[in-house]
Image (tube, rainbow, N blue to C red):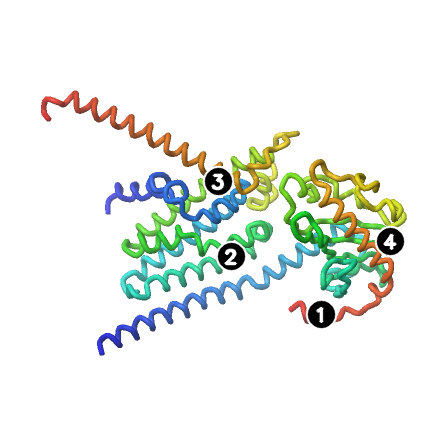
Amino acid sequence: MNNRVSILIAAGILASFAVAGTSLVSFTHVATKDRILQNERETLLQSLHALVPPESVDNDMVADVIEVESIDLLGSEQTSVYRGRKLQQPVATVLTSVVPDGYSGPIKLLVAVRYDGTLGGVRVISHRETPGLGDKVEENRSDWIYSFNEKSLDNPSLAKWGVKRDGGYFDQFTGATITPRSIVTAVKNTLLYVRDNKDALYDRQTTEPAAKE
Amino acid sequence: MSDNSIRQLVTDGLWHNNQALVALLGLCPLLAVSNTAINGLGLGLATTAVLVASNSTVSLIRNFVRPEVRLPVFVLVIASFVTAIELGMNAYFHELHKILGIFIPLIVTNCTIIGRAEAFASKNNLWRSLVDGLSVGIGFTLVLIVLGGMRELVGQGTLFDQAHLMFGEVAQGLTLKIEDFPGMLIAILPPGAFIGLGLLIMVKNLIDKRLAEREVATTSYTEEATGATG
């Protein structure tokens, strides 16, 4: 009898701590939720506007987004396309392309393509390339990633879209060829995709504004 | 509880029983996050906050939590604090949170924390547990910063890189950079963490040995002087 009471008390204590712990977590969640959402939004907006200058567009690029699918050219099952417009006219799109064949795993990119087909710029969002070798693709480690600025499928010509070792236009790094080679290919593929779907990308309505909830 | 024993607690946490250098607990976050001094500082502060909060709570509840459910309750307390602190970091230090991201939840698995809760806080009063949590946490943080600084300096020739993530834009000037330093890659890679930690332990043991020798020297000197009375 006594034994049973003590088990019940122990269970009660455990349960009340579970409730207390959960309340602490949910309270913090509610208190920080809006700020975290806001942070994520601002971070995204900042990286979008690094590629498409804020004065060149007048819409909210974070909200003006569609999802597209093209594993062959964009590297993942779902690619977000952020659209920038000014006075309802298309200015640029920013695609979240993925490099499927990085040296160690996929590399996530942001590729900004202007309406005239030139690149606004490319940034590496996340990667697992070797520190000190492949990670020179990061913006704060070397300015290699800027070599894409203003380029298009005609400049350099399509055949020259490769690293110098393969007879292409773009530099590779000492000791790391695979990473730059795969990124150059992914950017070229993104340009090809945008060329083939140019107007469709701007015309499609934002499908799921509620899905961001 | 005298001042003496509090001082004992502080020196134990910081030095004699440093959880990273002596107990070798919490190696997972210690080795993974110590690639720059600032990363180390960020994770160290988060760990310290969890330690202080969990030690205090465990000490407050130590008398009415039954021994048979003791450990699950401690784990619950620690996990709740870690989650709350992670959310807080995400809200207020978003950039740093992006870097430390996956390691913050792993603080739960840092054996130091459950270790201090079980071995110390569940047997001591609130004030002593708080001091213990703080000194153990700071001891752990210091090792993280030193190890991170070493690896950063040797590996990429910078010190306090990305300090602005922690302290805002004013801290940009804090970052030191050796120009044209090629860097030794191994220091940044995981082996560098093990080598660095090994060197730190070696230095600590050397210092301890020196101190012990000096102590022996002084005691024997005193013994000689007062030998007649012995």
Quarter that holds the N terminus of chain A:
bottom left
Judged by depth in the image, the label closer to the viewer, 1 or 4, is: 4
**Badge 2 vs badge 1, beta-carbon distance below 8 Å:** no
Dot placed on the residue nearer the N-terminal end, 2 or 3? 2
Q: CA distance from mark 1 to mark 4?
A: 27 Å
The reply to whether label 3 and label 1 mark residues of one chain is no
Residue positioned 72% across, 49% down in the render: A123
Report helix, strand or loop for mark 4. Answer: loop
Q: Percent position (x, y) of residue A42? A: 66, 56
> Mark 2 — residue?
B86
For discs 3 and 1, the disc positioned in front in the rendered view: 3
Residue tagged 4: A117
Q: CA distance from mark 4 to mark 3?
A: 49 Å
Q: Are marks 4 and 3 on the same chain?
A: no
| Type of amino acid under label 4 | Gly
**For this view, does B115 lie left or right of residue B190?**
left
Q: Which residue is mark 3?
A: B194
Residue drawn at point x = 55 percent, y = 46 percent? B166
The type of residue carrying mark 3 is: Phe
Callouts 4 and 3 close, C-beta under 8 Å: no
Q: Chain of mark 4?
A: A
| Residue B210 in the image: above or below residue B50 | above
Q: CA distance from mark 3 to mark 1?
A: 48 Å
Report, in whole angstroms, how far the alpha carbon at label 2 lies from the one at label 3. 27 Å
Report helix, strand or loop for mark 2: helix
- In the rendered image, which quarter is residue A8 located in? bottom left
Q: Residue at x 52, y 38 (%)?
A: B192
In the rendered structure, which amino acid carries the disc numbered 1?
Pro
User: Counting residues from the N terminus, which is met first, the one under dot 1 or under dot 4?
Assistant: 4
Q: Amino acid at mark 2?
A: Glu
SS assignment at label 1: loop
The disc label shown at residue A209, or none:
1
